Amino acid sequence: MKISSVQNYSNISFSPKTQKAQTFQQNPVVQHNFAPSFSGGFPLNVHSPKYFAAKTYLCMAKQAYKKVKTLDLYMFDLNKLDGIQEGINVFKGLNMKEIAFVADTVAEITVNRGCRNICAHCYASAKAPIKETANQINKMSWNDFTSLTDGFEELNKRVGFSIFSQKSNKHAMIIPFHDADCSSIVLKDNDGKEHDFIDIAERFEKVFNLPILFDTAGWNIQDVKAQKRMEKYVEYYSKPENFKKLEGFNLSVNPFHAMYAKSLELKQNRKPELAEKLYDLYTTRMANVLYTLTPLQENPRFNFIARSAADKSKLPKGFKSKDLRVLYMDILEKVNKLYKKDIKGEQKIVKNEDEAFKCFSDYYERLGDISKTISVSERASKIVPDNDVMAIADKEMRNRSLQDIQNIKRVRDFRKINKDMNRHFYGIVDANGDYYLTTFRTSFPTEIKFNFENKGKTTAPIAPYLQKDTPLTRNVINNV
């Protein structure tokens, strides 16, 4: 059987796609079964009365919960439990009420910051990584990464259960990015050894016992390191026992990528040759991405994040569903050619025409599932008119979140709000240890700061719409 031409496919079903934020509530949080531990190799002043008072209180309090399957920090008197964290350096300066708040809200740990895809619809308004200097960083240091994960792991052992099992913790995964592409997430340890996404995911799984999300909008076809890295990931996650550790492996294919958007701009400026060249580069790039990721197709958690504006929207030509259909056709034609070339050559991805046709057809069907709703971030607002229904809805949601933060007087109020997924706040640990909250429509600083070696250093601003003048204060967080 031969691979049919893309033009022979004319009936694509375009149905709504689950919003990204909704992914957080797919799976239930699983309870750890830790045995209580109070040392773990962490330095601790054995004469600390505060630590031993907390230890004594915890042992006595847990007797009342013998028949309770799932414990969480808010079931205990956090004033009396304060001190159990002593000797864990990353928590220096934080009390147990503040640590409990983080455990209850954390969703993103920004191992790397910045993305070179510069998609116009990016909810985080991601920019290219800032230049690292003595005073600014674009990634966590290895010491800070291990200090954070080791600290959480040790605290889990000390209390004897997962501190991430809070009942209001509706998000069911942990994410190693906020505004980075997973194809570029890499940390170097103090010996210069690279630790990639797989290493980080394994560490997160051990500490948080939550699935992790992989998300990419593709990589430069000329970037040999990125290509080899992605081929490694495909080989690893092709095994079901490894893929099941992921909440999802998301691939974003959209008309908002910087290369495509620039080609539209050049076309409007009557530079057709340059526009066509850039368009060809983008479709070639994405064809290589689809070809490389083909072995993951059969797993139901391999997802396309395909977004465009509705055909009736007020966005400019080029960003609508009908434009995305054309873009997909051109990308799939090139995927088709790569399959044919592979059959005649190494047979690395597909071995015969029947197999190629099956893979091609699967992509064709997947690429038809398009969401027509986007988050109107600062960058997206440049192409989405203020009177567009999406812009109006986003503004209303931002205003509601601002009112929520302003009206919160105690953690109990916050946890009540967080049970409503339409108003949910997600926590972000920045690369410098600062802690933020986001709704993916707007973001807020908090006064919580982890004791990182890079504490106080500058990072790229957290987006979207960071409300710098409306932080969630320690007074509110400590008013349980």
Image: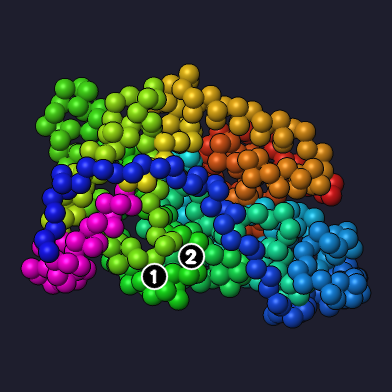
Contact between labelled residues 1 and 2, with CB atoms less than 8 Å apart: yes
Where is residue 426 drawn, in percent x and y? 62, 48
Please say which color scheme the image uses.
rainbow
Q: Is 342 colored magenta in this rendering?
A: yes
Q: Would you name the residue on which mark 1 appears?
A: 237
Q: Would you name the residue on which mark 2 appears?
A: 246
Q: Secondary structure at mark 2?
A: strand
- Pick whichever, 449 or 71, lies toward us: 71
Where is residue 108 drawn, in percent x and y? 56, 54
Q: Amino acid at mark 2?
A: Leu
Q: Quadrant of residue 70?
A: bottom right
Q: Can residue 341 be spotted in the picture? A: yes
Where is residue 36 drawn, in percent x and y? 77, 79
Q: Quadrant of residue 425?
A: top right
Residue 246 higher or lower than 465, as above or below: below
> Which region is colored magenta?
339-367
Q: Amino acid at mark 1?
A: Tyr
| Cα–Cα gap, marks 2 and 1 | 9 Å
